[in-house]
Amino acid sequence: MTTATAFDYLLAVVLIFLTWMMLRSRDLFTSIVLFILLGMLISLAWVELQAPDVALVEAVIGSALTGVLFLGSLGYIESGSGRQRASDRSSFLSRQPRELIFTFLVSMFGGILCWTIFQLDQTFTGLSAHVAGEMSHSGVKNSVTAVILNFRGYDTLLEIGVLLLVVFAIFALHATQPISLNRALPKKSRVLAVFLYLLTPVMVLMAFYLLWAGGHAPGGAFQAGAMLAGVIILMLVGGTTVDLSARNALMRIIYIAGFAGFLLVGILVVQNQRNFLQYPVESAKHLILAIEGLATISIAATLVTLFAGCAGFLIPDHPEDCEIGGTST
Amino acid sequence: MSLAFLYGTTGMIIFVLGFRGLIVYAHFIRKVMAINVMGSGIFMFLIAMAHRTPTDAPDPVPHAMVLTGIVVSVSATAFILALIVRLYNVTGHTSFEEIAAQTKEAPDV
């Protein structure tokens, strides 16, 4: 139990104000920039709440990568036509009386939710005592990593499965081809080239540090994978061509490695006394590191593919090559 | 006010603002952004509630749940955006209103 300081009140007000500004702003590009900013400030709030692991993931995936996905989609849509901005904000509810009534109803709903929060207990131990008691069996020193990869291994296995599923879905939506951003960026930026030259090694090193650090400090496979994905997306923007298509055998292995490795380890540890995903205490640390290493590479490849799918880079230039959809554009 | 209740309330207000945005604004990308904001509000509520422990260390289980949640929400966002881009590629529209207006003009389309 900590009492909020003036900084916390200020941050809370800024967060609410930014959310409001972001959703209201007339220009979608401004909205997305505010969305990224909002994510960064939310991760600051999570540092205040002593959740550094969550803050890292929010900063890297929730804010930066999601923002890049939005920018990619917006870029594709706006490159198609300039008339989008006109219909940006109107919907059947945006006419004055309806919008006011709806806003009033929603504020009532918000009031009820806030009132409910204040009915909750002031202190609540939750499961932290159980986690603290079992930490010595987990093989790692960071309690969040222990929960993610050991105590609640099922969740994380299925989470990596979700990522794999989205890759399948995106390949099902778009005909696949090698990805290059060259057509989006006719002029290569020299500033970006130098920036990449200097920054790529540092970012790759940082990614592997985050992976290793996950055992005892904030960090882990998702943070590391997102970092690597960031490097690859920057390289794509810098003009590199990467063959991400599912026809590429190496890419298939990379996409599936994280999920398959996790599943395999989970099955291999099954013995007379142990269940699925119940690691032996003495080798837990190495098994977790192996799973996280494979997962990092899969997550990086997956996130880059998600970006390519959202930014329309997987859509071929000639729609008639594509089996699904019409040619009514 | 304790940190947990300050940020819990903030999270709920952000959730409600996102819900309003989801209904009021028409553009698909803005709707997806609103859904993401609703998610952030709920995550903030969970993390805030994990901070109510009497000891210094907060409850790590909600933290792990939120980590999973963030990754799942980015996956879902990517999938919706890919669908939006594909829909735009095929029809040239970015909101239900545009599609409805076109259907009204030419009902056979």
Image (spheres, helix red, strand yellow):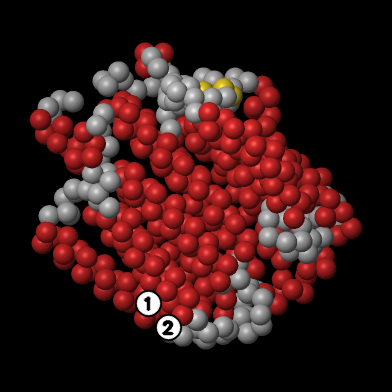
Q: Residue A96 sits in which quadrant?
A: bottom left
Which residue is disc 1 drawn over?
A: A114
Residue at 34% across / 23% down in the picture? A325
Query: Above or below — where is A139 with respect to A232?
Result: below
Percent position of residue A76, x then y: 37, 31
Residue at 53% across / 84% down in the picture? A3
The reply to whether discs 2 and 1 touch (Cβ–Cβ < 8 Å) is yes
Q: What's the chain of the residue with tag 1? A: A
Residue B9 located left or right of residue B107: right
Q: Secondary structure at mark 2?
A: loop
Percent position of residue A31, x then y: 34, 50
Residues packed near mark 1 inside 10 Å, few (<14), some (14 to 19) or many (20 plus) = some
Which residue is disc 2 drawn over?
A: A118
Q: Can the viewer see residue A29? A: yes
Three-letter code for the amino acid on which mark 1 is drawn: Cys
**Quick one: quadrant of the C terminus of chain A?**
top left
Residue A237 located left or right of residue A83: right
Percent position of residue B73, x then y: 49, 50
**Quick one: quadrant of the N terminus of chain A?**
bottom right
Three-letter code for the amino acid on which mark 2 is drawn: Phe
The image's mark for residue A267 is none
Q: What's the chain of the residue with tag 2? A: A
Percent position of residue A310, x then y: 44, 35
Query: Above or below — where is A37 with respect to A75?
Result: below
Residue at 52% across / 73% down in the picture? B48
Q: CA distance from mark 2 to mark 1?
A: 7 Å
Residue at 39% across / 49% down in the picture? A33
